[in-house]
Image (cartoon, coloured by chain):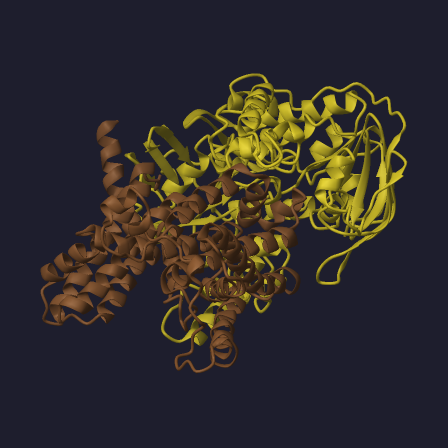
Amino acid sequence: MGRRDTAAPLDVPPAIELRGISKAFGTVQANKDISIRVMPGTIHGIIGENGAGKSTLMSILYGFYRADSGEIFINGKKTEIHDSQDAIRAGIGMVFQHFKLVPNFTVLENIVLGAEDGALLRPSLAKARRVLDELAREYELEVDPDAVVEDLSVGHQQRVEILKALYRHADILILDEPTGVLTPAEADHLFRILKNLKEQGKTIILITHKLREIMEVTDTVSVMRRGEMTATVRTAETSPEQLAELMVGRKVLLNVPKAPASPGATVLEVEDLRVTDADGVERLKGISFQIRAGEILGIAGVAGNGQSELLAVLGGIMKGQGRVRLNGEELDLTGRHSDGQSRRARGIAHVPEDRQRLGMILDFTAWENVAFGYHHDPAYQKNRWLMDNDAILRDTMGKMERFDVRPPIPTLQAKNFSGGNQQKIILAREIERNPDLLLVGQPTRGVDIGAIEFIHKRIVELRDAGKAVLLVSVELDEIMSLSDRIAVMFDGRIMGERLPEQTDERELGLLMAGVANGKGDAR
Amino acid sequence: MTRLPRWADLVLVPLISLLLAGVISALVILAIGQSPWEALRTMVVGALGSPYAWGYTLYYATSFMFTGLAVTVAFHASLFNIGGEGQATLGGLGVALVCLSFPWPHWTLALPAAMVGAALFGAAWAAIPAWLQARRGSHIVITTIMFNYIAAALIIYLLVSVLKPAGQMDPATARFPEGAHLPQLNEIPLVNLIFDKQVPANVTLFIALIACWLVWVLLWRTRLGYEIRAFGRSEPAALYAGISPFRVTMLAMLISGALAGLMSINNVMGESERLLQNSTEGAGFIGIAVALMGRNHPFGVFLAALLFGFLFQGGAELGLWTTIPIELRTVVQGLVILFTGALDYMVRMMLVPFFRARKLEAA
């Protein structure tokens, strides 16, 4: 694929060329003398850990930041980009990780927004409708122009973002972590779209931390580490292992080795569990499963199929109906003892899916977050009235050392840690409670590769210590490599259970799409 | 990136805001044909120029500390309690009932009892909006505003129809017994070496200072304070941690209402010694500005209360000694609130390039 395009004639200038870009924030050098050439009609990947400087570089290219030094050439012409309007004029379009759409506008209105042709909306909308129609046919980018954006699936919303850029005549598309929110099928469709765009001569820059995506769609890939460009290679000539090593600066285990499970007594028994949310929608429609000591049960599924509610009800955040037994004793699902404190007292620890919204208070310091949820712990009290902040501080320093949190400064606010280090703080807090059951959701979302390895190791260690682990993740790789058993959820139900060694991503993908036996045709 | 050093954030930004408020105030005074210099001199002399002047400034500052703390505690639970006015009014009723119900032999006995009355009535008045918020989701801003009006109407009714002694003309309670008289600063040994003339500032000032310290302990040293702050920053996270939103909402508002109610120890018991109509003189609302300017920190509240005490007393002096109308006091206060509260971000933005340039030079 794409051979024709990568071998562009030598006299064609690169679509984008950055020369010696440097950018510092205070004492932090976010980008250090970065040079990069992206040929037209290619897909160029940029990978690197969080904080490696990928987003800063793209923000400079899109006019959000100004580089301290360095030059930008678009199609061989030196270009000054002061703001996003300059970038759009230069033919650059950006699709952000978090979409910038107006939820209650229609697709058409969103596309025209900011690119209206005059004071009257109607001619612009009519024109947009025509253009949209052409684009849809050309690139497999079908979206109903009259649909209201908030009613669209995430995948479709992303298409609207891409269409927005194309409508503004973008020849160069930058996509920032585009698959983070997509189902595997949606991601496949996105890649088809990207390949189409490439065939039509568009240039695409794909920022991601997922090695598989880089291998699948890019022609060339640049690796960033600590603000520097460590390598630019042809994708065909590299391997995931090599890229991971370039990113982290050392050898990384992409799959944590683990011994076969030796499950003991049943720890968690869930029977016909139902959850109805505040809007009266039934999110869990009667699910049953068991987890035994020394076993990791992985819950696979597309986000939004009830996994979050499962964690919430077991973690004491939501109420539910049904029967849940922990070590043979009934858990209160509705009454006074259905809150998070009671769950912790029963030996359930919870690493929530959305660590920044649920798992910690971003404005709190690291040590305040270490006490979060355990602030009633007698070890953290000075006397009946006062908390022993020094004791928490000391505990935090120990945890930071054992979990390799960087920087190991307990008084730093949580928001100043990277995603991986935030997760390590939460993990340290929950795992060191030595729980009988660990609930863990999206343990490595937005976490660097180096930290992923560490986090996976800790989860496997807990299992090996004879604890039960309920793992919820939308990353199939993660589910496959960590789980001892896999249950697939779809629409509030468990579609089936599989053993990781007896299934593959295709079968799980079908179950995730709601195909009952996992054997049917997806389409 | 756009972060300022801590000292600039805490000291420089408020100072520049104040300066800007002062400049605009000066322009307003110029515009009405008066001398800003004369106005400033009158204010400074009248509010800070003598122990007597300080006696008034501190009296107002005492009230503002309580109402500022009340807003602060609720604010940390992400509850915007703008019902301090009503809660303080009801606190006054509690004080009056306690003081009038018993022939108190000595103020040291009357004061604790009156404090309990003030705090209980203030907390009770906050409890209803708090419950409505916690259980029914009625927005606390709306309900506390409405409760201000209800409080005002209730007090007028009680003063006119129930509490007014027979034969008295004005709507007010009887005078409190002699034994409920709180020592003013000029009546306290040693302190009276400084305050030689009679001033309204009284022992409540010291209670206010202790309250500042206690609120700091509450917020940053106790489990309840921890839960209040956690809940205020993120309700979903609080739920995750097993913190009960109902409990925190209720307790934060009860404490807030109690603090607002305690203000009435200062004005009702310490100054007027009977309950009058509109005894709070807007201190409940000024508490919002005090908390805002004090960055919702007890020490900041202390400083901001002093500033607003100065503005209040200095403004009154303007009306007394110059031809500048007393309403100008409201204008100046408004400008201070505008610049220190609402336009805080603007000042910050103006400073950012300066600090960035400095950093680059240093690097």
- Which residue is more in the foreground, A353 or A75? A353
| Residue at screen point 56% across, 21% down | A404
Q: Is residue A188 left or right of residue A107?
A: right
Residue A238 position, x and y percent, is 56, 24
The reply to whether residue A407 is visible in this rendering is yes
| Residue at screen point 18% across, 68% down | B320
Residue A439 position, x and y percent, is 73, 36
The reply to whether residue A163 is visible in this rendering is no
Q: Quadrant of residue B276?
A: bottom left
Q: Is residue A522 left or right of residue A360?
A: right
Quarter in which the N terminus of chain B is drawn: top left
Quarter in which the C terminus of chain B is drawn: top left
Instruction: Indicate whether B351 appears above or below B258.
Output: above
Instruction: Indicate whether A225 appears above or below B28.
Output: above
- Which residue is more in the foreground, A1 or A381? A381
- Which residue is more in the foreground, B304 or A312? B304
Residue A471 position, x and y percent, is 74, 35
| Residue at screen point 78% across, 30% down | A483
* Number of numbered callouts drawn: 0
Residue A419 position, x and y percent, is 54, 34
Determine the colour of chain B: brown
Q: Is residue A295 left or right of residue B32?
A: right
Determine the colour of chain A: yellow
Residue ranking furthest to the top = A251
Q: Quadrant of residue A487?
A: top right
